[in-house]
Amino acid sequence: MTIKKSGAKTRSLLFAATILGGLGWGATAFAQSAAASDQDQQATSLEEVVVTARKREERLQDVPLAITSFSSEALEDAGVQTLRDLSYLTPGLTINSGGSEFGVSPVIRGLTNLNGGAGDANVSVFLDGVYLQNASATNLALIDIARIEVIKGPVSALYGRNAFAGAINYVSAIPNEEFRARAEGTLGNDGMQTLVGSISGPVVPGILAARLAAGYDTFDGSYTDNITGQTAGGFEKKDIQGVVSFTPTERLSITAAAYYGDDFFAQSALGYNVGNCGARTAATAIVPNVFTQYCGRLEPDAQPVEVPALASSAGVSGNQREVLNTSVHVDYDFGFGNLSYIYGYNDITQQRLNDFLGLRDGIRFELTPLAPGNPAQFVNLQETFGSDGNNQDSSHELRFASNQDQPFRWAVGGFYFDSEVTNTTIIGVDGRNIPAGRTLLSATGRQYLTADGRFAPGSYTENFITETQKSAFVGLDYDVTSQLTVSGEARYTEQEKSLLIVRSTSCPATATGAATATCAAASGPNVQPIYPFGGPGSTTGNPSGSFEFSNFRLTAKYQFTPGIMGYASVADGTKGGGFNGRATVPDDLSFDPETNDTFEVGLKTSLFENRLQLNAAIFHIETQGIQISGPSANTVTPGLVTKNFGSTTSNGFEFEAVALPLEGVRLNLGIGYSDPKFNDDAFDFGTGPCALIPTCAPRLTTIQAPAGPRAAISLDGLQVPRTSKLQVSTGVSLNGSLSGGWDWFARSEFRYESKQYSLPNNYNYFGPRYQINARAGVEYGNYTLTAFVDNLTDDHTPETASYNSRLNDFNANYTLYLPQGRTFGLKLGYVY
């Protein structure tokens, strides 16, 4: 499929028109409305949003944190289905995704993950107060969510480790005494079909209530291989969610919740760009003018999308996950304070199998010659990447908080978390096309070759990770005056981790002669397990360790008027330490936590009888000990292990405005700007092609590394990769009445994200991204009919890009993970 996109000039005009038109219309309409007399108001006030971002119920406009909150109604109106959709409405938040909901990485204020997945996340995600450790299970189906809260800035003192850049809270809807039922169905293009239903109400009036929701969602994908007819980017999701609320007395309440998802995501839609800079491949006589790098803007439509057909005996082709999240909340009111306990248990099983290349015919490998001096011969083979994993964890949090209606308020508590993670990473080459009696010339290729073309391990790594975390925390608030409140939060954490690594080498079926005998003698018929740092039960070789750290947050809040509040805060954030599964020497086994210090000043306003809300925050972030690929202690390892190496600085601001200028008119504007830069102590050690790239060569230098002097590229002043400096979102919502009891509504959103660099060296970038969504419909009684279109311009800017390692004899292309294209359809809903 050849991707079509609107020109940059057209999109820029759409962008400018939307911004200027929305602001101009909004300013004029609001001025007219504000001038109206109190007796002739033309607009109702904005809703009072209540959040629990600080572990207690508070009005959003009273909380001295930068928070964007979305109610279930707001999520429904905007058509939000994934975290990516949520980011379109949230200034300061972007989502990096590997082409599906299976794996997402939230980025807040330019603080992104640079460790290649070796460590913890930068942003903590919670469901009903329970931490979701597994990144592949944080993108939940929103079938029965009361609200989502996005907290921007480090809140490690409040939430614990990994709330390094912020946190995202899913809050489930809680049943009450009101009986409610809902059903909703959607039909759209590319095989889109969705069905969601929920029911809620009392079981024992006044004592026991329950909610149950279920959803089914399927989509064929936006991309089709024009040769094979296979599609990519589709999914099938089956999810169920239930909540039970038990209130036997006025003082005691118990809430139990469970979420189960059985979701399948087909192969990701991949594009690719052929190398255009750096050194040429060593095999230029075979593949002339092929470069090892790509410089400049990565173009999603440079090549037609190809969807390889994986071997039918390979098992799952794509990404399969089973998610079980459970929680129990117990609250008891002693009168002078409240005791709360939260228990959580999560069990996530996942299986992945994806083509490594995005090329339907695979990539070229060189065969052993038929005889000395014969010309080279080749065969095209597919490379596959897969993983099998299971994550089980449980957590306990106990908190005692004083009453909130007194000048001095406090909370103390403790937290305990333990988890077991098993993950097998498998890399293979599909060898079915190799002629009988031949094998691959490259020893590297042979290492990954499967015996019979099935997805049996060619080479695998198993990681068995156990972790416990213990924390103690305290929070204090004091009303110095009726206008001034000072707050402090502190937390001490001890994190213990251990890792058992199992690697393998394989005995290729195509090996001959002495090689076969040697391999079989050493490893049996096929695979030889290797324990590089000890085996099962080892007390000295397996890496384990304890990471101890403390976090704080200090805040001063001043209420200038009932509708204007300002605050200033200083806080630090911590991302947990960990181990390198690919370490080759003991000195490379572990890396320490990454930390940041954040200084923030903010303003929150509710004006004109709460028909206008303006919120703004300015921040400065200093990050130390960034977890990045650094110099190995092994002289032959080119920097492919995670190290704490260097620092970054990010400055920026966020601005949000919501207005009801006229009856039936709602306007939204959000702007997020961050400028994350590497400091002069940050380096990249992939120096191979740098000398031949004009923008890179002047940055070549030598530094003193643990194993001696190392060539390096200075990153000083370069933009941190996978971050957008600027995000702008606008929205216009209209509604009114028709005759005969009918009502109508219409809504449109626009999102702009500036370009992102894919690597620290800033050789190449993708973007900017433009997203326009629109929906309109009618309501009659309990029924609602909505027509919608998302990604109106069919923008295919990659969600992320990577330079994947290749196992063949020649070179890699740059792989682009493409987003969902234009989708449209009709949705019918019924609420009782």
Image (cartoon, helix red, strand yellow):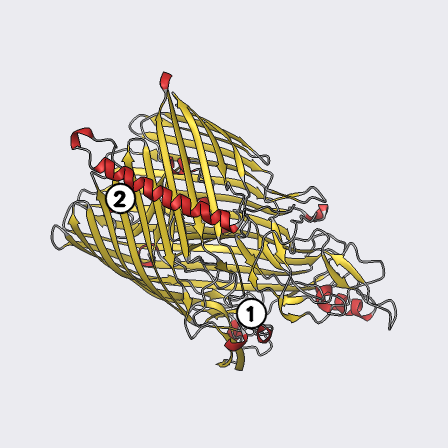
Towards the viewer: 28 or 803: 28
- Name the image quarter holding residue 548: bottom left
Dot 2 amino acid type:
Gln
What residue would you read off at disc 2? Answer: 613
Picture coordinates of residue 322, whole percent (x, y): 53, 44
245 left or right of 368? Answer: left
Q: Please name the residue shown 50% across and 36% down the image.
A: 789
Dot 1 amino acid type:
Leu
Q: Please name the residue shown 65% across and 49% down the image.
A: 305
Q: Is residue 216 above or below residue 127?
A: above
- Name the image quarter holding residue 697: bottom right
Q: Which mark is residue 320?
A: none
Report the mark closest to the observer, 2 or 1.
2
Of the 4 image quadrants, the one containing the C terminus is top left
Picture coordinates of residue 153, whole percent (x, y): 34, 57
What residue would you read off at disc 1? Answer: 640
Q: Residues within 10 Å of mark 2 (few under 14, many from 20)?
A: many
Asked whether residue 127 appears in the rendered view, the answer is: no
545 left or right of 390? Answer: left
